[in-house]
Amino acid sequence: MINARQLEVLCAVIEVGTTAGAAQELGVSQPAVSNMIRHTEDLIGFNLFERKHGRLVPTPEALRIEKEAQHLFMQQKRINAIIEELRDGVIGKLHLVVTPSVGLSLIPRIMSDFVKARPKLNISLELGSIDEIQERLVSGRADLGISITQPRHSLLNVSVITKGHLVLVCPVGHELAMQDRVEVADLNRYRHISYSSSTPLGRAVDRVFDEKGLPRHFFAEARHTAVALEMVANGLGVALVDEFGLVERRNNDVVVVPTNPKLPINLHAVTSNLFPVSLAAGEFAEAVKRHIEDKRTAID
């Protein structure tokens, strides 16, 4: 019922709040915008705006239409970008948004090998929280997310790249560094860097203490395991971190100790159901899986 031009005008008026401002933004006359809005309202059978204090206030119905229209415009931008890439001889683009623990060392290392076989691939990397990963994928601003925390968004497709565990890291020379395995519940006795109970990692650790009937105490809090790891490396205490963030760590400023009980954790590949998944995105997720498995084989 509504064509792309009508949606463009609707979104412009919602954004600036006046038909005059929308007309200037679109490069048309103000009457043309007003007529388009009236024609659209007649076509669909209900009002899209209310006039208040000289501005056009969108109705809830208009806002809902505008939200859906943004997905259409994003898809149009992706198509235009593909056309530009083909015109310029660039074969493909891959925008990654990943959790910091793997984004600081592991993913750049894999990217280095990945682009050698794909010299015309444009690739970008952004670090983000799980909320930021979800938002960028749903809006079409990223092609592939890689996350420790499993997203729960209905518009996202999630698969497990590989399985692992949380492990304890401690400074070189720390008394726990000499142990073969560390009891998680014993961490209350040490300067322990941990995560808020409002986070998935914090809740996973909480369950261990709850089963023992113990409160969990820690002297410092970190949002990401990558931050906790750097705090340990600088001698601030010990911490539980995901083993994936240790795969490419080259220095010897921390010691890794297994825990009891084992705390399983997965690395996830995340894509949007709203947009086609590129071949490069699927191949990169497989490259991450192979790299981690190869590293484990070499250690074993």
Image: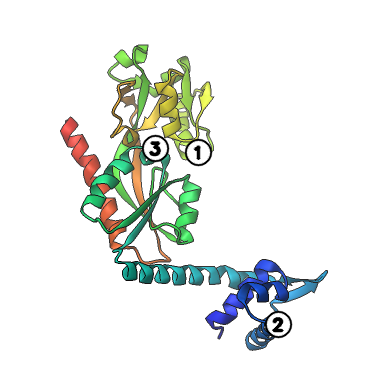
| Point 30% across, 37% down: residue | 164
Name the mark on residue 101.
3
- The amino acid beneath tag 2 is Ser
Query: Quadrant location of residue 108?
Result: top left
Residue 257 located left or right of residue 221:
left
Judge whether 128 appears above or below 38 on screen.
above
Q: Residue 74 versus residue 194: which sits nearer the camera?
A: 74
Q: Decide: marks 3, 1 in contact (CB < 8 A)?
A: no
Numbered mark located on residue 34 in the image: 2
Residue 148 visible at all:
yes
- What whole-number distance in Å separates the C-alpha atoms at marks 2 and 3? 51 Å
Sort mark 1 into few (<14), some (14-19) or many (20+) by Cα contacts within 10 Å.
few
Give the mark nearer the N terminus: 1 vs 2.
2
Q: Quadrant of residue 265?
A: top left
Q: Which mark is residue 199?
A: 1
Say which quadrant the C terminus sits in.
top left
**Helix or strand or loop: what does disc 2 sit on?**
helix
Of the two numbered discs 2 and 3 in the rendering, the one whose residue sits closer to the viewer: 2
Q: How much space separates mark 3 and mark 1, taking CA atoms?
A: 15 Å
Residue 154 in view of the camera: no
Residue nearest the viewer, comparing 119 with 225: 119
